């Protein structure tokens, strides 16, 4: 059996009941086959792929907290410190009822390659909890965050591991987590990113993932002699990534006609009103039905299993920005039938493996999340730099750096794909380019 196949089998065997982790590993290992097989014996002797697919450390802990009725609640807490070859662990925290160890491992694994692609010195990690912030009062969210940090604080630090936001973790949660870290450690340091602007946060971090997604999508189109202006875009999600992707798409002259949340989706042929969307989601924390109630041009559809939701709408570009495996083979077929040109992932692993294959076989331009959503973590690394030098940069300066990073990522993944005989396959390009830097650092640092 080839070394790649052998390692994939071992990963499945040693990590039972973690399908998302298996999926993420499978995608990466398939891409790396050309690199590994050119030098198989050396990689095998050094067990490089076993080390790459095994987290350096996994931390799991109990998170007890008291709800507003006086009832004690208990959640599971996780931090997976996946790989620190090129820098301190870096990656978000996800608070969502679906969170389990396998999901955090898939996200941590993806983060290793993504962070490498940014060109900045950050290793990969991820954490979170099965806590559901939805419907909780601010006091309950604070109680949970303080309890979570009371366990996590001993494992993190500005030069060790720097968490940030992800699904269910935004500015409010990062504020509570930072306050508790500072209180316990009595150290004022950049231990988290995505902080508020009055306590060390970076301008443009809130916007960065969505803006970055549009910067790389524009670079992709330009490389194929197309422009963003007048393109019709289907976006899924209605959270941080979806909102700022929509905002930047509109600024570029495109029209975004959809958004979605976990209960339903919107089709707005006049174009999404991003200020209204922000009000409904960021301020009121309400359902999308409220968006439709204030916007006569919008249709609201309840989510139904087996329907394509936002992917049934005719569009030039599709930007999945909600969650993993939200775009399956049938959705991909619907998009292709409707004449889609490009699919760029804002979320982490939103496209299933068979859907990705179908899109690529039909010559759809496709960029995977570890390249196209890297703008968020890249700007987190810029926040770390600002914290270290105790300065803050202007919005324009951070935004300019972000755009340059995204253009560089596009060039890098395009070149890597070409170099390994897979021109236009940006998934292979991203995985190889991300891997090479990490692998070289791991080799240089010996067996650790
Ligand atoms: P948010 O919590 O701000 O928004 C998530 C959105 O996706 C919400 O609209 C939510 O709906 C929807 N959603 C979440 N889970 C599900 C589900 N199981 N089924 C259907 N809809 C769902 O998160 P972000 O915008 O920050 O994250 C979105 C994606 O982008 C994730 O994959 C995340 O890992 C990835 N990402 C985020 C980065 C960041 O900087 N924030 C950086 C890079 C990637 P509802 O409101 O109903 O829950
Ligand atoms: O998936 C991701 O890249 C994030 N959630 C952002 C991580 C970060 O450290 O900013």
Image: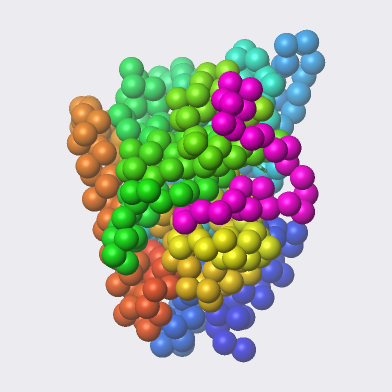
Q: Going 49% across and 80% down the picture, which residue do you hit?
A: 33
Vertical comparison of 20 with 181: above or below: below
Q: Which residues are magenta?
A: 290-318
- Residue 246 at x, y percent in the picture: 44, 39
* Farthest-out residue, top: 69
Q: Going 37% across and 78% down the picture, which residue do you hit?
A: 423
Is residue 346 or residue 343 the one in the foreground?
Answer: 343
Q: Is residue 92 visible to us here?
A: no
- Residue 30 at x, y percent in the picture: 53, 76
Is residue 51 or residue 316 the one in the foreground?
Answer: 316
**Quadrant (top left/top right/bottom left/bottom right) for the C terminus:** bottom left
Vertical comparison of 238 with 355: above or below: above
Q: Quadrant of residue 322?
A: top right
Vertical comparison of 127 with 220: above or below: above
- Residue 202 at x, y percent in the picture: 31, 30
Q: Going 30% across and 29% down the picture, which residue do you hit?
A: 203
Q: Is residue 227 visible to us here?
A: yes
Q: How many marks?
A: 0
Is residue 342 or residue 353 the one in the foreground?
Answer: 342
**Way the structure is coloured:** rainbow
Q: Going 48% across and 68% down the picture, which residue do you hit?
A: 364
- Residue 238 at x, y percent in the picture: 55, 35
Q: Is residue 2 magenta?
A: no
**Quadrant (top left/top right/bottom left/bottom right) for the N terminus:** bottom right
């Amino acid at each position: 059996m080839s070394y790649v196949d052998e390692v994939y089998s071992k990963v499945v065997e040693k990590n039972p009941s973690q399908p998302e982790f298996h999926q993420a590993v499978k995608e990466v290992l398939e891409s790396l086959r050309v690199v590994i097989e050119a030098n198989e014996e050396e990689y095998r002797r050094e067990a490089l792929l076993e080390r790459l697919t095994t987290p350096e450390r996994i931390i799991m802990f109990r998170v007890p907290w008291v709800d507003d009725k006086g009832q004690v609640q208990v959640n599971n807490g996780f931090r997976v410190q996946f790989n620190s070859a090129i820098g301190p662990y870096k990656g978000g925290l996800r608070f969502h009822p679906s969170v389990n160890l396998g999901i955090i491992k898939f996200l941590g694994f993806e983060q290793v390659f993504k962070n490498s692609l940014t060109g900045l010195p950050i290793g990969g990690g991820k954490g979170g909890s099965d806590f559901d912030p939805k419907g909780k009062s601010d006091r309950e969210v604070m109680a949970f965050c303080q309890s979570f940090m009371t366990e996590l604080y001993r494992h993190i630090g500005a030069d060790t591991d720097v968490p940030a936001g992800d699904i269910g973790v935004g500015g409010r949660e990062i504020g509570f987590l930072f306050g508790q870290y500072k209180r316990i450690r009595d150290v004022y340091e950049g231990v988290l990113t995505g902080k508020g602007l009055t306590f060390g946060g970076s301008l443009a971090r809130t916007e960065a993932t969505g803006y970055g997604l549009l910067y790389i999508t524009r670079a992709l189109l330009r490389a194929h002699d197309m422009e963003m202006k007048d393109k019709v875009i289907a976006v899924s999600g209605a959270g941080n990534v979806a909102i700022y992707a929509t905002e930047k798409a509109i600024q570029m002259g495109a029209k975004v006609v959809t958004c979605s949340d976990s209960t339903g989706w919107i089709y707005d042929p006049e174009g999404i009103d991003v200020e209204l969307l922000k009000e409904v989601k960021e301020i009121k924390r309400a359902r999308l039905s409220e968006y439709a109630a204030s916007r006569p041009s919008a249709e609201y559809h309840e989510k139904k299993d087996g329907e394509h939701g936002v992917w049934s709408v005719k569009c030039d570009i599709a930007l999945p920005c909600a969650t993993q495996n939200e775009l399956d083979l049938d959705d991909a077929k619907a998009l292709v039938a409707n004449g889609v040109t490009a699919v760029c992932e804002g979320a982490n692993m939103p496209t299933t493996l068979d859907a990705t294959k179908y899109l690529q076989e039909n010559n759809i331009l496709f960029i995977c999340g570890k390249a196209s959503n890297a703008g968020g973590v890249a700007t987190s690394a810029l926040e770390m730099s600002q914290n270290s030098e105790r300065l803050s940069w202007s919005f324009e300066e951070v935004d300019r750096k972000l755009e340059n990073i995204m253009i560089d990522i596009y060039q890098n993944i395009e070149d890597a794909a070409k170099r390994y005989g897979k021109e236009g396959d940006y998934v292979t390009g991203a995985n190889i380019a991300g891997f090479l830097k990490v692998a070289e650092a791991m080799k240089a640092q010996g067996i650790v």
